Amino acid sequence: AQVAEGMAEISRAGFGEAETLAMITPVLQTASIEHMSLAEASKIVTAAINQFNLTAADAPHITDLITKASVISATSVRNLGTALGYVGTLSTMFGRSAQETLAVLSGLAKGGIDAARGGTGLRAVMQGLVQDVPKHTRVLKEMGLTYAQIDPSKVGLIGALQVLKNANLDNSRAFALFRANAATAAMTMINNLDVIQKYNLALNDAEGTTQRMALTATN
């Protein structure tokens, strides 16, 4: 019954029969690891696939990234799924990958900003970098920067954070550059940037994580 429920949830997300069959194994593995229903696991996996414009064939890859991110940051697949619900689609619009997004969300979780707060925080920072920061040329100039140096479309999100950290971004300047909710999240990212970069590298080796952990969970 649970398998049928999970397959029905995948189908409701707009996937055909062959795609559903291709996705059900990584969904089953995710559910096993997290002790969640197949319906819930299906929602997390299908949402992530849709958010990052992936296909059913990418289901093992996206589940591996989410599972590995949850392990290395001591958050949960459920919380990361919640966070992605707030920022996944925007990340894709801004050209950011699932891996980079999950690395930053994991860093935020490490800094105590998890689940919905992590997703909304990252969304606010990304929007701020594109919409608000370019307006504050005076503050950037005081930091010895031009916007081109922190434009995430050119240097990436993690790259932009590194430039801001190297320019000694502090709380007062963060609140001058960003709106309040984005400033807090931005400083959490800056303060945990070494961890975020470590997580991003760790996610390069995510392949097979879900399968291995599911085997452990069932033994």
Image: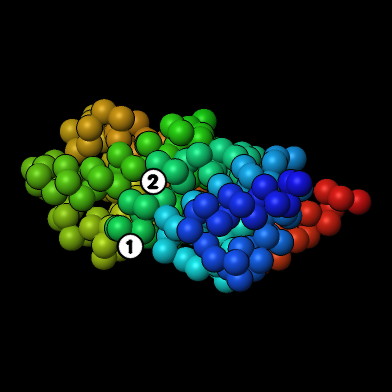
Front residue of this view, candidates 140 and 155: 155
Q: Percent x, y for residue 71?
A: 67, 47
Q: Percent x, y for residue 143?
A: 19, 46
The amino acid at mark 1 is Gly
Helix, strand or loop under label 2:
helix
**Residue depicted at x 61% and y 52%:** 8
**Residue depicted at x 30% and y 35%:** 182
Front residue of this view, candidates 31 and 68: 31
The amino acid at mark 2 is Val
- Badge 1 is on which residue? 95
Front residue of this view, candidates 171 and 55: 55
Q: Quadrant of residue 128?
A: top left
Residue lying at the far right of the rendered structure: 219
Q: Percent x, y for residue 205?
A: 63, 66
**Image-based side of 181 in relation to 145, left or right:** right
Q: Which mark is residue 87?
A: 2
Q: Are marks 1 and 2 in contact (CB under 8 Å)?
A: no
Query: How has the structure been colored for display?
Result: rainbow
Q: Percent x, y for residue 76?
A: 63, 40
Residue 34 visible from this viewpoint: no
Crowdedness of circle 1 by 10 Å Cα count: few (<14), some, many (20+)?
A: some
